[in-house]
Image (cartoon, grey):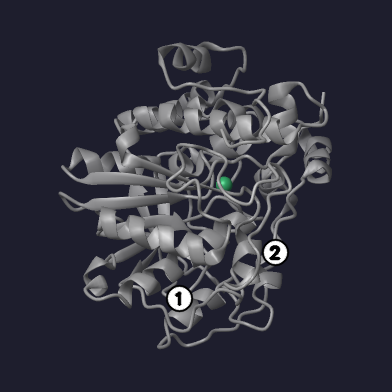
Amino acid sequence: MRPGHDEPVVTARVDAGIKEDMLEGRLRWRVARVARKGKGRRRGGWVGVLLALALCGVDPLPVAAASAGGVAPIPAPAGPPLKLEVPPKLRLLVVAPHPDDESLGAGGLMQQVLEKGGRVHVLFMTSGDGYPEAVALATGHRQPTAADYRGFGELRRAEALVALEHFHILPLSVTFLGFPDGGLQEIWRRGPRVPAYESPFTHDDRPPYPEAFNPNARYTSRELIGQIAHLVALADPDWIALPTPLDTHPDHCATFTFILAALKSLAAEPGGESKIPDRLLTYLVHDSRWPPLPSIPGPLPPPPQSFPPARWYSLPLEAAQIDAKLGALESHRTQAAVMDLLFRALARSNEVFGVIERPEFGRLKPGEPACGPEIVSHSAPGTVPITVPSAPLPAPEATPVAAARGTRVPVR
Ligand SMILES: [Zn+2]
């Protein structure tokens, strides 16, 4: 703990005790039961949807707004997505903006890589410590303190490690950068030559966690890009799984941009070109029209929008892999308590990825837009810009999961 910090109210240790507590505690979550039955139950109807929207503390950044003046996303091509094949002995790096995104986006992919003799490393950009209502729920404090937020970050880190045990991924293969939840897009926007960002939650301008990759790193884009580049050089991945730039959560699309910037930085170093992965597999978590409700059966369809190279791939999961993914999601107890609708909607018989082959990096640099498909346009100079009118709004029945995005629960 750094000098001047209060004692965290929420403390967490990764040991058998907390694991038992996490898996058998009083927070009840029905994702496994519902998903195994192949049907869900709509909660709250439209009243619930409107309430969730009203309580949504993170304003989704509409893709259309994010791409104003740039290249619009394009409708995903009709027809089934291509089938993704995992080659043997693959080195995979999974990048998650927050604890739970790794399991939501790539829980099945990680298992298949390991089952085929490959290696997996997981990189968490933040520890998910900027979620006021969830912190209030966990601590019982209506007005959480900075120490509460730091303690919540420690708890989510512990949950993530327990979740990854379901995939047989050990802590040695997991890295937490400890950057600020909710602050990644702003760090990018400020560019490299400004004072460090200070989290409005923890009031820190550097990771408050001793286990962070570099607790002394200031919250700047230069630091973050440097750390990611270092991690990529160490992991030397063939593929990187990361959020799509079309994700409407600012931390998610900014994560994509920081990864590209780090790869660009790495490629410029002597010998660095050989460290650039062959493929980027982008996954989507937050979108206004996707995924379908848990009550709608079947595998995940391709998201309604895409970006050059404009093709989604589907990775079918076996029953045991689905079970392990459900177990991992259940281990994220603090999130299961407030995001179960989205969890159940994404825990299906497949995962979908927008694949970018052999990425290039164009003129990407901090200070430019962090989100939207123009990032990909910048990074692929040969891509023909495509402008397509906004897709029609979905039917109301198709949107409740979107309403759960970033859902804030009332402080009780
Ligand atoms: Zn997230």
Q: Earlier in the sequence, mark 2 or mark 1?
A: 2
Image quarter in which the C terminus is found: top right
Residue annotated with mark 1 = 308
Q: Nearer the viewer, residue 310 or 10?
A: 10
In the rendered image, is residue 327 in sight?
Answer: yes
Q: Which mark is residue 62?
A: 2
The amino acid type, in three-letter code, at marker 2 is Pro
Position of residue 286 relative to residue 168, above or below, is below
Q: At 47% from the left edge and 69% from the top edge, which residue is drawn?
A: 77
Provide residue 101's location: percent of width, then percent of height: 50, 44
Q: Residue at x 69, y 39 (%)?
A: 131
Residue 342 is left or right of residue 300, and the answer is right
Question: Which residue is nearer to you in this view: 157 or 11?
Answer: 11
Which image quarter: residue 350? Answer: top left
Q: Amino acid at mark 1?
A: Pro
Query: In the image, residue 55 lies at what x, y percent?
Result: 81, 41
Query: Is 41 drawn above or below residue 228 in the view shown?
Result: above
- Dot 2 alpha-carbon crowd within 10 angstroms: few under 14, some 14 to 19, many 20 or more: some
Q: Residues within 10 Å of mark 1 (few under 14, many from 20)?
A: many
